């Protein structure tokens, strides 16, 4: 299949919307990561997503909507607290897991009685959904197990020839997938951390639960969010995360590694200054939002550069840091190095 490369012009978005209506796959940008979109009300179109990604069938998808009115066709009426969240955080990087209505294809929900819904804040994404005139099912547009794509180059690495079109717009803001919150349990339960933080959610609805797998990385026996049990976000290189170490301690640990051309370092500018850099491939960040935005694309860049080992500096797992560490630890298959290990 020849993959069309489209822009965000209205004419191109109309082409993309028409492809979606015909049941084709279209990769489109959102404020979090690129999504691999299909008509979310067509079982056959959604089946194409699983094929293109090599995604396990028991991992359900998020339905993306452009307008709050579309919710009434896919999910049961919102509880008061869920409504408050929608008012504060939509459009934006918050996915709500809600009780599902009949008519949503079972391959979207993986047969669960719930459906995940989000309204993206990137205007291009909402315009596309609006023009298509239906909810768009979209996982991140990567081959299953690889880091999510945050630029067109990374999308094409995985999806060229497998999808009808890619909307090329390198204006991805956040770089990590949306926060996923289960609104069917009491209190609500965080299933995946993202840019909408626990503190922000609790300011609106009070105390929320945090799924055990987020804190410990250990898989619960029956994960509430099926996607959490699979290998995720992983580069080809062996990856390690440095946690709970002082700058000096990290500098000492990385001293020899910084000279090695087979090593990739994902570190703060502050730490970089303490290192005597030799051949290592370095990606440095100065703020957590910058780290979040560039995490996945840096991992792919290390792989392209042929790096064999990646050492990533961790950050405190609070606020946005909870989402960063959740992804970083999974990328590294929980290879965590601490000062006393
Ligand atoms: O930012 C994002 O959310 C991106 C962009 C494209 O919108 N999408 C994304 O989709 O990250 P995906 O498929 O890569 O991740 C969806 C997550 C998975 O962990 C899945 O298991 C969970 O949401 N999920 C979907 N439906 C669910 C449900 N009914 N109950 C619990 N978890 C669900
Ligand atoms: Mg994904």
Image (cartoon, helix red, strand yellow):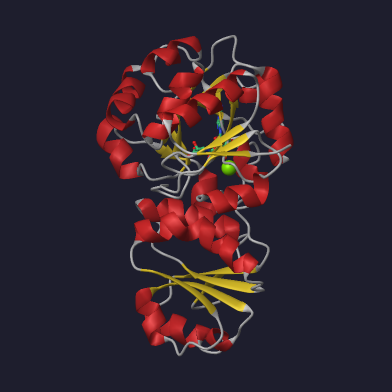
Q: Is residue 165 left or right of residue 12?
A: right
| Residue at x 39% of width, y 13% of height | 69
Q: Residue furthest left?
A: 203
Relative height, residue 113 to residue 153 (above, below) = above
Name the quadrant of the N terminus. Answer: top right
| Residue at x 41% of width, y 47% of height | 171
- Regarding residue 204, the answer to whether it shows in the image is yes
Q: Which quarter of the figure has residue 247?
A: bottom left
Relative height, residue 232 to residue 12 (above, below) = below
> Which residue is at the front of the view, 208 or 204?
204
Q: Position of residue 333 (x, y in %)?
A: 63, 59
Q: Which quarter of the figure has residue 59?
A: top right
Q: Which quarter of the figure has residue 270?
A: bottom left
Q: Is residue 288 left or right of residue 112?
A: left
- Regarding residue 116, the answer to whether it shows in the image is no
Q: Position of residue 203 (x, y in %)?
A: 25, 37
What count of labels does the image hold? 0
Q: Residue furthest front?
A: 11
Q: Is residue 117 left or right of residue 55?
A: left
Relative height, residue 190 to residue 20 (above, below) = below
Name the quadrant of the C terminus. Answer: bottom right
> Which residue is at the front of the view, 50 or 194?
50
Q: Quadrant of ligand 2?
A: top right
| Residue at x 69% of width, y 40% of height | 53
| Residue at x 27% of width, y 32% of height | 204
Q: Position of residue 118 (x, y in %)?
A: 44, 28
Q: Position of residue 323 (x, y in %)?
A: 44, 51
């Amino acid at each position: 299949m020849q993959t069309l490369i489209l822009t965000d012009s209205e004419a191109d978005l109309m082409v993309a919307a028409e492809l979606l209506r015909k049941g084709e796959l279209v990769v489109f940008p959102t404020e979090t990561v690129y999504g691999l979109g299909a008509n979310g009300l067509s079982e056959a179109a959604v089946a194409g997503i699983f094929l293109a990604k090599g995604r396990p069938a028991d991992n359900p998808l998020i339905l993306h909507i452009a307008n709050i009115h579309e919710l009434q066709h896919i999910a049961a009426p919102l509880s008061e607290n869920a409504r408050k969240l929608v008012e504060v955080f939509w459009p934006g990087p918050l996915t709500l897991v809600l009780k599902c209505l009949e008519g949503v294809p079972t391959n979207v929900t993986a047969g669960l009685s719930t459906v995940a819904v989000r309204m993206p804040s990137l205007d291009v994404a909402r315009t596309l959904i609006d023009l298509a005139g239906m909810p768009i099912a979209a996982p991140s547009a990567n081959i299953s197990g690889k880091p999510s794509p945050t630029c067109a180059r990374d999308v094409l690495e995985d999806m060229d020839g497998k999808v009808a079109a890619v909307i090329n717009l390198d204006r991805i803001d956040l770089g990590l997938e949306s926060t996923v919150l289960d609104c069917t349990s009491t209190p609500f339960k965080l299933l995946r951390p993202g840019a909408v933080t626990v503190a922000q959610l609790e300011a609106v609805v009070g105390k929320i639960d945090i799924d055990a797998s987020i804190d410990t990385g250990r898989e619960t026996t029956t994960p509430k969010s099926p996607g959490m049990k699979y290998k995720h976000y992983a580069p080809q290189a062996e990856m390690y995360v440095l946690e709970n170490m002082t700058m000096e301690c990290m500098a000492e640990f990385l001293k020899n590694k910084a000279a090695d051309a087979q090593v990739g370092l994902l570190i703060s500018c502050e730490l970089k200054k303490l290192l005597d850099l030799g051949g290592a491939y370095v990606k440095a960040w100065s703020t957590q939002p910058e780290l979040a935005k560039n995490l996945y694309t840096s991992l792919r860049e290390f792989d392209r550069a042929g790096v064999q080992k990646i050492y990533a500096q961790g950050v405190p797992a609070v606020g946005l840091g909870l989402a960063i560490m959740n992804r970083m630890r999974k990328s590294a298959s929980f290879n965590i190095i601490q000062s006393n290990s």
